[in-house]
Image (cartoon, coloured by chain):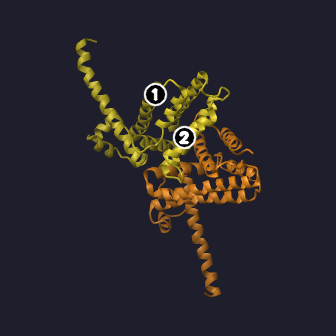
Chain colours: A orange, B yellow
Amino acid sequence: MTDASVSSSAPGLVTEEHRREAILEATWQLIAERGFHAVRVSDIARVCGTSTGTVHYYFPGKSDVLTEALKYCVEQAFNRQSVELRRITGAHERLLKLIDMQLPRVGFILDEWSIWLQYWAESVVRPEFRAAHNEFYARWQETVIRIVRRGQSQGVFRAEVDPENVALRLTALTDGAAIQVLTGAPRMTTTVMRELLVDFVQRELGA
Amino acid sequence: MTDASVSSSAPGLVTEEHRREAILEATWQLIAERGFHAVRVSDIARVCGTSTGTVHYYFPGKSDVLTEALKYCVEQAFNRQSVELRRITGAHERLLKLIDMQLPRVGFILDEWSIWLQYWAESVVRPEFRAAHNEFYARWQETVIRIVRRGQSQGVFRAEVDPENVALRLTALTDGAAIQVLTGAPRMTTTVMRELLVDFVQRELGA
């Protein structure tokens, strides 16, 4: 490959990748607002200022763009969280930061939770969704497990606790509390959700 | 009203009510299997051995039959649980029975959970679903609150615990664990779910 071919192809590749990402970005936001089944390829094209043909060029079928958008959204959220978490040395502060970043505040985090609720509803009736869902879910649980182990070696979390069991319960409690926030269930707000989760950390892990 | 009019109208009313119920019964099972958006009025009519016209006679729009079916399913589940719970005098056994009846075992309880996941996904993007959802959700939380209070007066649950806070956390943990079962998330089964919930009761309420 010559220098000339690199310089001529690289901008094209960048643009292709940018276009693909712009489509996924628009799609997941539409799914979060309207629900998985209410999004049409024409809606996506309109938001991106392009044609349905262009959307289909990157994603042959409607279900391709919808499922890739779910994955894209969750992937972006995980990457953003990972960067933030790595900045924090202490395991206790790191776990509180993870909880804080997952509170469904109005804005893009609320939209990301909306995506998870769509993901669950789809995964139950369409088992082909579960592999991707469970890969992401396992990654979330692994993050919690690693922070708990880190806290145990730092001596800030109780040594006799099983990290996997804590992760199972903390992720379940987080999902359940988030559902109550998102559906507007009685007595639940993001403030109450934070209290419940911080209280869980104190009860279960407090040294 | 004469005796004659009662005897002539009553059988008709019974049949009407039966037909309406048969439609709702078929509809919620279709929603549980295929998802809220994948169910067509023609599917409902076929399962009921009737015409789409008959379905529309009872439920003018497609969204009427779908939303009424969600409510019908949840209502039936609550009524069934209430009958079972009232048979049990001891609050501790009553709470364990509630947990047991809510485990998403394969069969109609799994289907009922599938309905809840559809309900959540819809409630987030269509706020008009929330009133009915939250009424049911509040009823579930009230059931837990009453059992906890009962256990406190029976002296089998710790007196200093706040029943509302326990209900908030037990319902969230139940929902979160059920999601993990239904999506096939790593490490979670109905057996593990039961252990988590029974363990919660022991930790939080154990006298």
Q: Is residue B117 visible?
A: yes
Most extreme residue toward the top, as rendered? B2
Relative horizontal placement of residue A68, taking residue A98 as reference (left or right) = left
CA distance for labels 1 and 2:
18 Å
User: At numbered mark 1, what does the secondary structure look like: helix, strand or loop?
Assistant: helix
Q: Amino acid at mark 1?
A: Ser
| Residue bearing the label numbered 2 | B174
Relative to A68, say whether B29 is above or below: above
| Mark number, residue B200 | none
Q: Nearer the viewer, residue A28 or A115?
A: A115
A6 up-or-down from A132: above or below: below
Quadrant of the frame with the C terminus of chain A: top right
Quarter of the rendering occupied by the N terminus of chain A: bottom right
Residue drawn at point x = 59 percent, y = 33 percent: B167
Residue positioned 70% across, 60% down in the render: A83
Q: Nearer the viewer, residue B151 or A73?
A: B151
Which of B116 and A12 lies nearest the eye of the viewer? B116
Specify the amino acid type for callout 2: Thr
Look at mark 1 in the image and give the residue it sits on: B82
- Provide the chain ID for the residue under circle 1: B
Bin the neighbour count of mark 1 within 10 Å (Cα to Cα): few under 14, some 14-19, many 20 and up. few
Q: Is residue A45 visible?
A: no
* Left or right, A123 with reference to B141: left
How many labels were placed on the picture?
2
User: Is residue B202 left or right of A61 when viewed as pictured?
Assistant: right
Instruction: Farthest residue to the front: give it.
Output: A160
**Image position of B20 (left or right of A91):** left
Picture quarter containing residue A135?
A: bottom right
